[in-house]
Image (cartoon, rainbow, N blue to C red):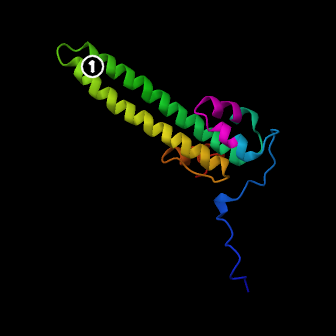
């Protein structure tokens, strides 16, 4: 019979990865650094060969960073188009710029949450991005 005073075991996703790392870093530190959008993900996806936890966060970072970069390019083009419109162009560019700034802030918040989750050994799927990253890391199975 379990001890009623003992704390419950952590959920499966919160347990540290038991897989050995090919880097000289603890897996949670490597995964947190891999969360740096695009660049951190690419570096750690190339360097880490064995630890699925680090590879998942690296792939998630690559996809998330790519989406962020793509949004930045599209927002810049749309803002430039708005600025070139006569009369109300600068006003439209200002409104669109404020909306784009809020979206960038949302990207930063998601990045910080993913980094904290990685540092605490919790596997967290960024909505829409996480399942794609998991599919890539696990070799096509969802």
Location of residue 68 in the rendering, given as x and y in whole percent from the top left corner: 48, 32
- To which quarter of the image does residue 102 belong? top left
Start and end of the magenta stretch?
Answer: 31-44
> Of residues 124 and 133, which is closer to you in this image?
124
Q: Main secondary structure of the magenta part?
A: helix
Residue at x 73% of width, y 55% of height: 16
Quadrant placement of the N terminus = bottom right
Task: Residue at the far bottom: name it.
Answer: 1
The residue that disc 1 covers is: 82
Residue 132 at x, y = what percent?
Answer: 55, 44
Q: Is residue 100 left or right of residue 65?
A: left
Image quadrant in which you'd find residue 100: top left
Does the segment drawn in magenta span residue 52? no
- At 44% from the left and 26% from the top, the residue drawn is 72
Where 5 sits versus 127, above or below? below
Q: Please report the residue visible at 68 percent of the width from the left and 42 percent of the height from the top.
A: 31
Please, which residue is most extreme toward the left here? Answer: 87
Q: For label 1, count other residues whose C-alpha is less than 10 Å away and answer few (under 14), some (14-19) or many (20+).
A: some
User: Furthest-front residue in view?
Assistant: 5
Q: Is residue 41 magenta?
A: yes
Please state the total of marks drawn on the protein image: 1
Toward the viewer: 124 or 51?
Answer: 124
User: Closer to the camera, 4 or 123?
Assistant: 4
Circle 1 SS class: helix
Q: Is residue 52 left or right of residue 21?
A: left
Please give left or right for residue 88 compared with residue 112 in the image.
left
Image position, residue 124 (x, y; %): 58, 51
Q: Position of residue 123 (x, y in %)?
A: 62, 52
């Amino acid at each position: 019979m379990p001890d009623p005073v003992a704390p419950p075991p952590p959920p499966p996703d919160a347990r540290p990865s038991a897989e050995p790392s090919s880097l000289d870093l603890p897996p949670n530190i490597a995964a947190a650094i891999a969360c740096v959008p695009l660049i951190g993900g690419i570096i750690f996806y190339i360097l880490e060969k064995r630890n699925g936890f680090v590879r998942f966060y690296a792939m998630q970072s690559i996809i998330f960073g790519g989406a962020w970069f793509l949004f930045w390019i599209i927002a810049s083009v749309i803002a430039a188009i708005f600025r070139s419109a006569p009369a109300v162009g600068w006003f439209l560019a200002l409104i669109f710029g404020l909306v784009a700034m809020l979206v960038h802030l949302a990207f930063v918040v998601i990045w910080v949450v993913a980094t904290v989750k990685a540092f605490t050994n919790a596997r967290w799927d960024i909505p829409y991005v996480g399942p794609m990253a998991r599919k890539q890391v696990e070799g096509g199975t969802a």
